[in-house]
Amino acid sequence: MSSHSEDLYSVLGIGPDADAQAVRAAYRKQARRAHPDAGGTAEEFHEVQSAWEVLGDEAARAAYDRKLRQPQGAGAEEDSENDGPTYGRPGFGGFGGSGAAFRTTASGSTSARSGSADSARTPSGTAHLAPIYIPDLSRPEPLSLPLTSQRTHGRFASKGLFGGGRTRRAERMAALLEKHVLAELPTARLFNAVALEPAGKDRRGASRPPRGPAVDHVLVCGDTLVVVSSLEVPAAAASWDGRRLHAAGRSLTLPDLTGDSRLLRATLEAAMRDAGRETSLNLGQQLVLHSPDGGMQSPVVESRGAGIARAPLAPARAFRSIREQLAASAQANVIDRHLLAALRRQLQHPLE
């Protein structure tokens, strides 16, 4: 980190008296400015991320403030030549359950430390590194530079597949995913209304928009796909037995996101092979539940059995789960332009 970044408040352009809302707003502003996609540098982006790891968490910020008030050198240990400061912010990017801390070295690399045995829920430490583009941005193919940088792709039709009520719910969910997932993972991309089966061709041999079954949302980060759908639950509490959701005296059958994600993976991997790029995609799924009060913490879901599928969750916990799934990949900072192009071909309603 550069010398001016020793004061984490100055990195975000705020004072020590800024409240939590001001800290978050400043972080988002500086992250957009410093991101390499927007003309910043990897060093600047790391400085912003490191500041947010500390100042965005109440306990870590309090410890940092206490350190600032100490006389210079009191109780401080010199960092080794190759090591940068260690930030142990619990809850960074929604990963509070993993117990992870990230050490940023002088070379800019990041590694994750975790006391959790569940590696699938532990961030790899690569999600906030400078993005690596495959192929690099000197080539206009297989996806134009504006589309490569675009974070959200696809829209929802007002009629047909989704219908009015479902469309409104899907659009609301897309906005929430942008706010609570894309804002935290710089290389993540969101695709809406994604067909599961390959697009066909018309009589002239030209590709036509895909038809058939589709999923509401697909998030991609590196080599990981997470299929997301949402459901309104007419209660503030529900129970999950591993296969069905029980709420307000009703038993609800949930969409088969596991089967959908496997079908989509087969379609995308076949498209990648056709493009001369062998790949193996990791899969994740999450069903997000909405309650009548519209709160982020409800409905409360009680799990009463072990099931194959990932448990449906209220928005706050669901978004944390999605971030964990996406950031677990060691390739979380890789933007595969072939994969993005393949996903765009699956959009039922592309939006330039």
Image: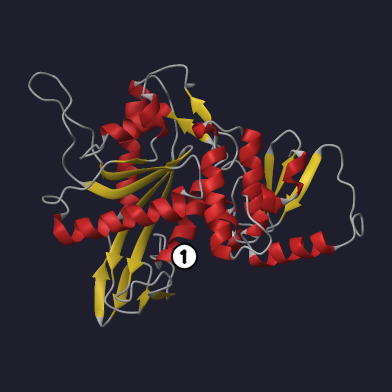
- Give percent across and percent down for residue 214: 23, 46
The quarter of the picture where residue 269 lies is: top left
Q: Residue at x 55, y 44 (%)?
A: 31
Q: Residue furthest bottom?
A: 249
In this orientation, does residue 102 appear?
yes
Q: Residue at x 15, y 21 (%)?
A: 206
Identify which residue, 136 or 194, lies in the foreground: 136
User: Callout 1, which amino acid?
Assistant: Arg
In the displayed structure image, the side of residue 19 where residue 88 appears, left or right: right
In the displayed structure image, the side of residue 240 where residue 108 appears, left or right: right
In the displayed structure image, the side of residue 250 where residue 139 appears, left or right: right
Q: Which residue is mark 1?
A: 317
* Disc 1 residue crowd, few under 14, some 14–19, many 20+, Cα 10 Å: some
Identify which residue, 178 or 317, lies in the foreground: 178
The quarter of the picture where residue 42 lies is: top right
Q: Residue at x 66, y 64 (%)?
A: 17
The quarter of the picture where residue 209 lies is: top left
Image quarter in which the N terminus is found: top right
- Give percent across and percent down for residue 241: 37, 72
In this orientation, does residue 120 appear?
no
In the displayed structure image, the side of residue 9 where residue 175 appears, left or right: left
Q: Is residue 211 above or below residue 309?
A: above
- Give percent across and percent down for residue 190: 37, 44
Q: Secondary structure at mark 1?
A: helix
Q: Residue furthest left?
A: 203
